Amino acid sequence: MIFQAKYMVVFTGAGISAESGIPTYRGAEDGVWHKYDPAKYANIRYFLKDPKYYWGFFREVRYPLLKQAEPNKAHIALAKLEAKGVLRAIITQNIDGLHQLAGSRRVLELHGNTRRILCMECNKGYTIDTVYRQLETQFPPTCSGCSGRLRPEVVFFGESLPTAVLEEATQETRRCDLFMVIGSSLVVQPAASLPVMAKQQGARLVIINKEPTPLDSIADVVFHSAASEMLGDI
Ligand code: APR
Ligand code: ZN
């Protein structure tokens, strides 16, 4: 299917980064770390009410995980398929930036990227290392330019997806002839509607996910296996 494809698009979720040591949100074994409550650290209303909760999570969990995470064989295989001109775009729900670290260039980040921190007042950008260091003396962190509050450039629950990125992802989904899902439970909308849209416009749909997904029944091929094994073989 890959070699017959004229326009292959891949859609990834947390499962592709599990083998890089980043816990998934809903996977059977790990499910996200339980010390911090995603209903708090991943929710915009809670973040605005009590930013210290998020920054505590960032300092203790998010930052250390990002620093140890390396792209795995699955990320690297996708970068190679793009370099060969086979894979045209990756649409990802992940915020870990591992596709770019693996060398992928066209990556549409539906939920943003947690390696980018910005000031809510003046939009000044910061790296996670700069912010991590500032936390030792300034908690929660503030902007060195205007003392505004900082936030990760991610889509919190309660916020809408970046329209331009969603529009681009929809266009890619509409024009592909092969849509491959890797490591997503396909339960969060509107992302999970993209595979359906691809199938409806006539693309072949392949799902690689450790556990069954609600869209298995409409896929042309389903592999319930680990992403790095499958992509390594491919
Ligand atoms: N290889 C393949 N699949 C895997 C692997 C692996 N090594 N490890 C886990 N999985 C599968 C799990 O079985 C699970 O079905 O990956 C899927 C991950 O699903 P989720 O944890 O729900 O992640 P995702 O689908 O990306 O969640 C979507 O929900 O919480 C929000 O914004 C967050 O982007 C996230 C969105
Ligand atoms: Zn500022």
Image (cartoon, rainbow, N blue to C red):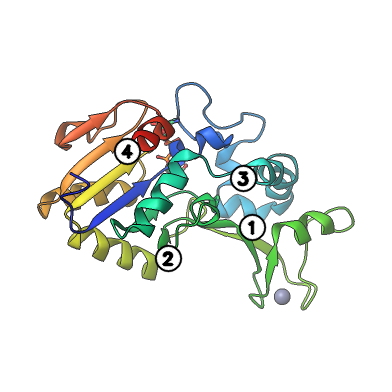
Tell me the amino acid under the disc marked 3. Answer: Tyr
Tell me the amino acid under the disc marked 2. Answer: Pro
- Looking at the rendered structure, the secondary structure element under dot 2 is loop
- Looking at the rendered structure, the secondary structure element under dot 1 is helix
Query: Where, by quadrant of the figure, is residue 165 drawn?
Result: bottom left
Looking at the image, the residue that sits furthest to the right is 137
The reply, left or right, for residue 233 in relation to residue 38 is left
Earlier sequence position, callout 1 versus callout 2: 1
Residue located beneath label 4 in the image: 234
Instruction: Report the mark closest to the observer, 1 or 3.
Output: 3
Residue located beneath label 2 in the image: 162
Earlier sequence position, callout 2 versus callout 4: 2
- Looking at the rendered structure, the secondary structure element under dot 3 is helix
Earlier sequence position, callout 1 versus callout 3: 3
- Give the vertical position of 31 relative to 7 (above or below): above
From mark 2 to mark 4, how far is it between C-alphas? 32 Å
From mark 3 to mark 2, how far is it between C-alphas? 20 Å
Query: Where, by quadrant of the figure, is residue 21 drawn?
Result: top right
Tell me the amino acid under the disc marked 1. Answer: Leu
How far across and down, in percent of the image, does residue 199 sit? 15, 48
Instruction: Indicate if the residue with disc 3 has its beta carbon within 8 Å of ligand 1.
Output: no
**Residue 205 in view of the camera:** yes
Q: Residues within 10 Å of mark 2 (few under 14, many from 20)?
A: some
Answer yes or no: do the residues labelled 2 and 4 have beta carbons within 8 Å? Answer: no
The reply, left or right, for residue 106 in relation to residue 173 is right
Image disc number at residue 41: 3
Which residue is found at the position 70% from the left and 62% from the top?
A: 127
Tell me the amino acid under the disc marked 4. Answer: Ile
